[in-house]
Amino acid sequence: MARGLFALFAAIVICSAVQAAQQRLTLKDGRVVSGNVTKTEGGYRVETAMGAVEYSDSQVVAVEDIVSPETLYQQRLAEIDPNSPEDHFHLGEFALKQRLLDQAAEQFREALNLRPQFEQASLMLERVEYLRARAAAASQPATAATEPVYPGGYTPQEIRDEWLLTDEDINWIRLAELRPTDRVRIDVDNDTVDRFIAMKRGTGDFRDVYAEQRFRGLPPMQKALYILSRTTEQDTGIRAGIKVLGNPQFMIDYRRYVWPIVGRTCGAPECHGGDRAPGRLKLFRSYGTDDRIDYTNFVILDGYVSSSGRARMIDRANPTRSLLLQYGLIEQEAEFTHPQTGGRSRVIFPSVRSPAYTSVLNWVMSLHRPVHPDYHLTYSPPFGMKLDFATSPSALSGAASAPSPSVPQAPAVPPSQRPGP
């Protein structure tokens, strides 16, 4: 009899353990409640650190299991193609987001084993190793704590706030490079809308009596593009009221295709990413996660002109002449050689047909061109750097050929979405 009661008690305990699991409830009012969840007859009982709470079935939208990052990592690891460097790279990114540094390092190394010239994986591995070194230093007693170093013994230089672009500078760049295809949140404040309508009232589309109402009803992106297409770069008072709350595609592609190459070559600590600015070019160490650092590096590259004045790092009028591409080509295919080496320390693009070359070239061609827009920057670069955005591209390149067609800064709103008739 006692044995039977013990078996029944054990069964009840096991059943309770199965029914009461760590889960997450999403409620209709938007709240998310996590804890030890037990299904009841008419709803759910959630045991949290603050006590037990019950919710009826009508209050609950969804019930999800809470899975540990390690378990999710193992699940994804079982699903990837072990021979795909891209799969290993994306799994490494996932592990890094979950703060699984050892697993992230392992996946980035696997990606590099399969593709030794995988620049993004190499850059991300460097970041992980730095984070691991910093974590190890933090775990030591305060008296023994040391500054973490990058692989190779390089101690990262402190990046001062005044060396970087402001958030306002970044917004002006985003506005200038905004495209209708960008998937980014836009905010246009009401004062800007009112001022724009007052400026345009009785002209163009706004001759129609219903134009104002239609304009106010446009989605934020269309509203912003419409304002940009009907104002000039000098209308800063109007344009300043448009906030781009995220990165347009040009910056996403910069982080994906351009910086991984630059960061591992001319942006390396032993080159322009160190404590000095050889050739008056200084880049800041970045892993594609800090907007201020990434936009600052972009602006430095964008405004860099060679000492001879004949070439730009990013040539919007003649993209193939951009030093960003020229310095990575084999000598037989390059027009410009690196002034410090008389050649190049590393061939990045085996030919103009290589995928990496095409990706960087397409990125340059995606920028506002052929004339550089006015970014309205207040930025003053450090380390004696001089940035030049206004120099005529044709004068720099000496090209007689006609420049490529300009990409409109802000195409007009489609007729179906215009505020006028």
Image: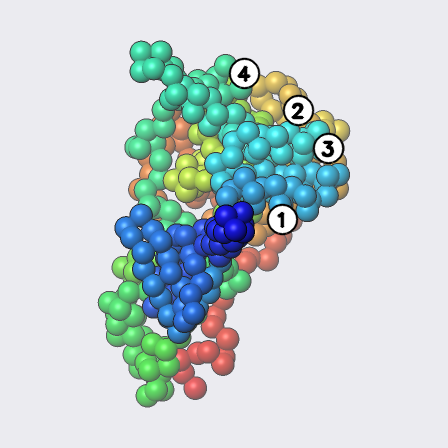
The tag earlier along the polypeptide, 3 or 1, is 3
Which element carries disc 1, helix, strand or loop? helix
Q: Which of 75 and 373 is in front in this view?
A: 75
The tag earlier along the polypeptide, 1 or 4, is 4
Q: Nearer the viewer, mark 4 or mark 2?
A: 4
The tag earlier along the polypeptide, 1 or 2, is 2
Q: Which of 115 and 29 is in front in this view?
A: 29
Residue drawn at point x = 54 percent, y = 58 percent: 407
Q: Nearer the viewer, mark 3 or mark 2?
A: 3
Residue drawn at point x = 38 percent, y = 22 percent: 138
Residue drawn at point x = 55 percent, y = 57 percent: 406
Asked if the residues shown at circle 3 and circle 2 are in contact, with their CB atoms under 8 angstroms apart, the answer is no
Pointer 3 residue: 114
Residue drawn at point x = 41 percent, y = 36 percent: 293
As drawn, the label of residue 152 is 4
Pointer 2 residue: 346
The tag earlier along the polypeptide, 3 or 4, is 3
| Residue at mark 1 to residue at mark 2: CA–CA distance | 22 Å
